[in-house]
Image: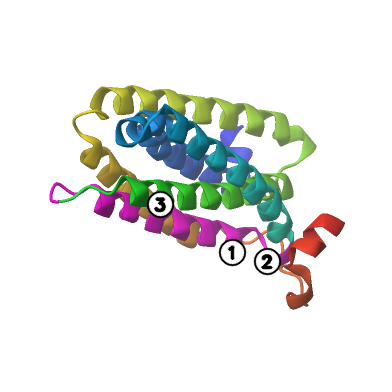
């Protein structure tokens, strides 16, 4: 059954597994990081801002994926995630420590993830059929949860003393995800001809 799935589906599930594994190494524990850097009140506000922005980015990303195409938005999101992870490494080198920069990069990474998610889901729908869709979502569900479990186990074990190592691993994973997306994923939805009139927030709300 796995071999009967469209190549894009197989590759997206593999890339999402890798990406979820990398993000699970550090992001579930960032509230602890921010709490040590600031306090509980500021940490709560910052985490709430991240959640709201991720939600809005998902809505906007769902619209943009129909305008620009799935693959282009995936590549853009993966590139931003890579820049964000590199920024987190640079903000936590042994010679200096910038929690505010870490938050900004995490904020940027969450926006990128919000843009990627609807593009990925739309691509899976584009190339799946009614017969393969249930199997596809079952595999995707278990792959994501397995990646989350493995990532959180490793992250929980190493987060306190080896944060820089975890962020370096995240950079390597994001590089791999970007390259795999670039060279293994094909477009499944052509971009709209007249782009300029369709990227504003007003068009999103109308849609």
Question: What residue is at 82 percent from the left and 56 percent from the top?
Answer: 205
CA separation in Å, label 1 and label 2: 6 Å
- Which label belongs to residue 105? 3
Q: What color scheme is it?
A: rainbow
Q: Residue 71: x and y, percent?
A: 59, 60
The quarter of the rendered structure image containing the C terminus is bottom right
CA separation in Å, label 3 and label 2: 25 Å
Q: Secondary structure at mark 3?
A: helix
Q: Secondary structure at mark 2?
A: helix
- Which label belongs to residue 72? 1
Q: Is residue 90 left or right of residue 61?
A: left
Q: Nearer the viewer, mark 3 or mark 2?
A: 3
The quarter of the rendered structure image containing the N terminus is top right
Between 97 and 87, the one lying in front of the other is 97
Q: Say above or below: 89 vs 140.
A: below
* Sequence-wise first label, 3 or 2: 2
The residue that label 2 is drawn on is 68
Q: Is residue 104 left or right of residue 73?
A: left
Between 178 and 133, the one lying in front of the other is 178
Contact between labelled residues 2 and 1, with CB atoms less than 8 Å apart = yes
Indicate yes or no whether the magenta region holds residue 84: yes
Question: What residue is at 58 percent from the left and 50 percent from the top?
Answer: 116
Q: Residue 200: x and y, percent?
A: 74, 67
Q: Residue 155: x and y, percent?
A: 32, 28
Magenta span covers which residues?
67-95
Q: Secondary structure at mark 1?
A: helix
CA separation in Å, label 3 and label 1: 22 Å
């Amino acid at each position: 059954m796995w071999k009967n799935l469209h190549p894009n589906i197989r590759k997206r599930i593999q890339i999402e597994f890798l990406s979820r594994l990398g993000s699970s190494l550090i992001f579930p524990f960032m509230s602890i990081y921010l709490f040590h850097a600031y306090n509980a009140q500021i940490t709560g506000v910052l985490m709430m801002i991240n959640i709201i922005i991720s939600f809005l980015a998902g809505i906007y990303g769902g619209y943009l994926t129909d305008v620009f195409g799935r693959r282009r938005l995936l590549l853009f999101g993966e590139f931003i995630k890579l820049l964000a992870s590199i920024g987190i490494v640079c903000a936590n080198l042994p010679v200096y420590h910038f929690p505010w920069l870490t938050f900004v990069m995490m904020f940027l990474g969450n926006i990128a993830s919000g843009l990627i998610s609807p593009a990925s889901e739309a691509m899976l729908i584009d190339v799946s059929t009614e017969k393969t869709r249930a199997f596809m979502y079952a595999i995707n569900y278990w792959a994501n949860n397995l990646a989350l479990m493995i990532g959180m186990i490793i992250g929980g074990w190493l987060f306190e003393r080896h944060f820089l190592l975890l962020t370096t691993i995240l950079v390597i994973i994001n590089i791999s995800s970007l390259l795999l997306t670039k060279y293994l994923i094909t477009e499944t939805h052509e971009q709209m001809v007249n782009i300029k009139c369709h990227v504003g927030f007003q068009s999103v709300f109308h849609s």
